[in-house]
Image: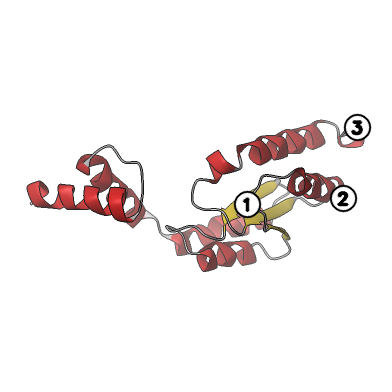
Amino acid sequence: MRFILRPLLYLFFSKLMKMKIKDGDVAATTVKAVSAIDFPSQLRYIQQLRDSHVQVLMVYSGSDPFIEQSISDHLVEAFGSIKRLICSSVVPEDSTTDEYIEAVRSGERKVAVCFAKEGHQLQKTRAKFLADAIVAMLEMNQNPATMH
């Protein structure tokens, strides 16, 4: 069965889904990992975060071929009063970072940012935003009065 299934999975992921994947073994492992994800079971953890003072930055894509935006929107909605930012540009811009920093400065502890036209690889396409947002979050937590 592996002899047939793994090459088919490789073709599916590499050609149809356009994923850079090494071989059928990696494709099979990907299927196994994805099938173990149970988004509804994550809701209890979101409730714990929502009820805490922990700072949250949730970043997701509006054009992800693997995770439907409605699933991410549902997770954001589970936070209740979370600040939502939407970036419609496909070109990285500082205004999204500025909006995030302003939200944190104004006391928002939980912020969700949807990159509406981005795909699955936000850690690559929006690496600068992620790094700047994390630095801003850490600076704000370290010394709220002197954030720049």
Count of numbered circles in the view: 3
Q: Label 3, on which residue?
A: 146
Q: Residues within 10 Å of mark 2 (few under 14, many from 20)?
A: few
Real-space Cα distance between discs 3 and 1?
32 Å
For label 1, the SS is: loop
Q: Position of residue 43 (x, y in %)?
A: 53, 61
Tell me the residue at 11%/48% (across/down).
2
Q: Is residue 99 left or right of residue 44?
A: right
**Closer to the camera: disc 3 or disc 1?**
1
Q: Position of residue 92 (x, y in %)?
A: 67, 44
Q: Label 2, on which residue?
A: 106
Do the residues under discs 3 and 2 have CB atoms within 8 angstroms? Answer: no
Q: Position of residue 110 (x, y in %)?
A: 72, 53
- The amino acid marked with disc number 3 is Thr
Say which label, 2 or 1, has the lower sequence index. 1
Real-space Cα distance between discs 3 and 2?
13 Å
Query: 145 or 136: nearer the eye?
Result: 136
**Closer to the camera: disc 2 or disc 1?**
1
Q: Residues within 10 Å of mark 1 (few under 14, many from 20)?
A: few
Query: 14 or 66: nearer the eye?
Result: 14
For label 3, the SS is: helix
Query: In the rendered image, which quarter is residue 24 located in?
Result: top left
Real-space Cα distance between discs 2 and 1?
27 Å
For label 2, the SS is: loop
Residue at far front of view: 91
Q: Residues within 10 Å of mark 3 (few under 14, many from 20)?
A: few
Q: Position of residue 83 (x, y in %)?
A: 74, 59
- The amino acid marked with disc number 2 is Ser
Say which label, 3 or 2, has the lower sequence index. 2
Q: Label 1, on which residue?
A: 90
- The amino acid marked with disc number 1 is Val
Instruction: Give the quarter of the figure containing the C terminus.
Output: top right
